[in-house]
Amino acid sequence: MPVSVQEILKFDKEHLWHPYTSATNPLPVYPVKSANGVYIELQNGTKLIDGMSSWWAVIHGYNHPVLNKAITNQLNNMAHVMFGGLTHAPAVNLAKKLFKILPENLTRIFFCDSGSVSVEISMKMALQYWYSKGKSKKKHFATIRSGYHGDTWNAMSVCDPETGMHYIFKESLPVQYFVPQPKIKFHNKWNKIDIEPFKSLLMEKQSEIAAVILEPIVQAAGGMWFYHPQFLVELRNLCNQHHILLILDEIATGFGRTGKLFACEHADVKPDIMCLGKAITGGYMSFAATMCTNNVANTISEGNPGVFMHGPTFMANPLACAVSIASIDLLLNSNWRENVLRIERNMFKWLTPAKNFKTVSDVRTLGAIGVVEMKNKVDIENCQKEFVKQGVWIRPFGNLIYLMPPYVINDEELKTLCNAILNVAENQ
């Protein structure tokens, strides 16, 4: 039975709790009827060009026939089977495909449910690694401020405890070590002063730190900040020098978003553990993976208790594995790099005029990421309303109005997104 827009909105407001909003006084929501390509169609027939890739995951656009077919074909065999004591071709084939594109030192894959769970797993791996080596005092993590790694418990502990969205929990979370955010921008000249705080911390606390965890090159939800690749190079060397594991959170940056398949390639740095999520399925379903080296896997497996203590119910879900294989094939068989560079070039050209606005403090682009940083916090409700009027879907946060569009977006659609941002930013 069809449900009216009014019924949807009424029930939603009374019973559904949306992300990062109040249950009693929520931000307005817009009922969606369908989504195709780069367009989201609302129940009232309004079509919006999507500038968010549904939180950066839908890199090929919506309702893609190749991805639909991959899921349908797999559904005819099995939607799910437990991964404890069983295995299946979709998991094996996905792992083989990932190994062809991942840093070559990563040789073990632990499939899981979501990005934040992948981060939790990476942190547990690091802790169990040192426990197995008889160094249980190495139980803390080090990271940079303004980072974001998810909303689950240990993931929150390595998000910025002061400026991040989890500050109200800081007294309850495990205490980690934080150094200042890197200040040298991606395209600027490197200055070694940027790495000095990390150098001092790791030298002083090396006996307590299990791993360094951070987002490579792009700090996404913590502020859309792009830092210099040399920072990662220096950090990798420091981790080697002080016998500390390096975890790279590529959940937002993986699968081409920054102009490289993985952001760590900008620095030619290989982590000990890597987290993937979001675009791994082309945005079709929740799925993630945590990769590690043989050294990490073998140390955990040969120590006490001899097994890695984690096992999600939907680990290596066959549907998710099948659509991930199809999504990676789609990406690798396309001109994705040229597409992402085209998007970067055009966003730079069309967003740069915002630098002249009195309301704007910075404009920056990298790969298929475009950011207009406002001087003041954005009024999300009014911005959202104005963007919908202009036929686009852009969801700001904090003082940032940004774009992470699907890679299949054309120039006309991209220009419409950029012009909408200019219109809104000038009048904030």
Image (cartoon, grey):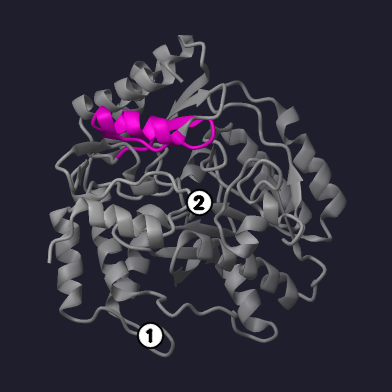
The three-letter amino acid code for the residue at tag 2 is Ser
The label nearer to you, 1 versus 2, is 2
**Does residue 310 appear to the left or right of 337 in the view shown?**
right
The residue most toward the bottom is: 85
> Cα distance, mark 1 to mark 2?
36 Å
Check residue 343 for magenta coloring. no
Closest to the observer, 245 or 18:
18
Q: Residue at x 40, y 38 (%)?
A: 395
Which residue corresponds to mark 1? 82
Which residue corresponds to mark 2? 22
Helix, strand or loop at disc 2? loop
Q: Residue at x 37, y 63 (%)?
A: 286
Q: Quadrant of residue 365?
A: top left
Image quarter (top left, top right, bottom left or bottom right) of the N terminus: bottom left
Q: Residue 118: image x %, image y %? A: 51, 64
Vertical arrangement, residue 151 with respect to residue 385, above or below: below
Please report the bounds of the magenta region as a residue range.
380-405
Vertical arrangement, residue 414 with respect to residue 102, above or below: above
